[in-house]
Image (cartoon, grey):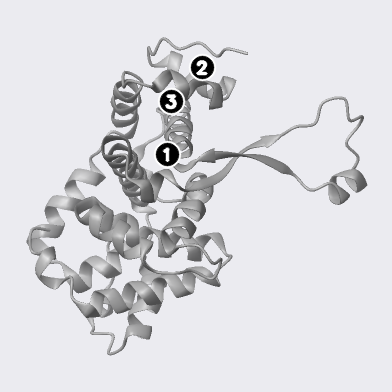
Amino acid sequence: VRKLGAILGELLRVILRAVVSKLNVSYAPNVMQSLILVFAYLIQSQLEFVLEFLFCLPSSTGKSALNQLMSDWVQLQGTIFGSYDTKMSIVALSKVLTYGVQTQDPKLEAIVVRGDEIFQQGGGIQTRSKTKTTPKQYTEVPLLTKIFKVLVQELGISLESQEVDVLSFEAGSVGIEGSEDDGEESGSVDDMVESLLMYGSSALKENFFEDDDLDIIDEDLANLDLREYLTDYCSQFCQLPGFGNLIPMLTEKEILTLQDVGVQVTLTN
């Protein structure tokens, strides 16, 4: 990881531009996951580089690639599969949140994303035909608020499933082990992007990092107790000044999750 600065040359930038281009036209959750995890992996050690690079890169929506990535990421987080990839994504999001709060980075603070679904009260029985003709409506929340909500939701999931054998999930993670052919040079940026789609973050690791560095990163993430990590992170985050302003944007379920880990917070109407 310490050697990453020396290889952040034009090749990596070209590859990341290609990844963003793929994300612009991708709708399948598993494909989007592989693309998002490329940036989640880089954020572990090069957060500021990733944010600046994406902010300066336009997307098909007319907004920055940073806006698109973060909007897609927080919406898809709940569908990311594989224990290792889930941990990597959660840790990366927490790093973005911590950085955003500590630096008040305008690049992050300016992003507004989809929040919670709005349920209409007194609208009568929701029939199938009415559901089809009435599109779902959602609130809009600042990105940093949404990230915290996502982390609390992940904490709730980990509390509900803490009896599950983590090793069984580890065996099912996409592309952790790779194969003998994985190490072959791609020969082109397109081949590299296709490799990223097939093997997720492991393809990036195989092409840009040495084995001794990988062992440290993999061991830390693979052995991470996600419930303990999220409990500590959320508990500390709730002690920050200004947290009270965020409480009205939390759902009752999110409040209950925080209370389950000892955070004294009350949802006010």
| Mark 3 neighbour class, 10 Å CA radius: few under 14, some 14 to 19, many 20 or more | some
Disc on the earlier residue, 2 or 1: 1
The residue wearing badge 3 is 159
Q: Nearer the viewer, mark 3 or mark 1?
A: 1
Under circle 2, the secondary element is helix
The answer, for residue 31, to whether it is visible in the render is: yes
* Residue on which disc 1 sits: 144
Residue occupying image coordinates x 44% and y 15%: 260
Where residue 67 sits: x, y (%)? Answer: 46, 56
Identify the residue at image location x=32%, y=76%: 15
Q: Secondary structure at mark 1?
A: helix
Q: Is residue 47 above or below residue 268?
A: below
Q: Observer-nearest residue: 267 or 109?
A: 109
Instruction: Answer whether labels 2 and 3 touch (C-beta < 8 Å).
Output: no
- Amino acid of disc 2: Leu
Quarter-of-image position of residue 14: bottom left
Say which label, 2 or 3, has the lower sequence index: 3
Residue 55 higher or lower than 208, as above or below: above
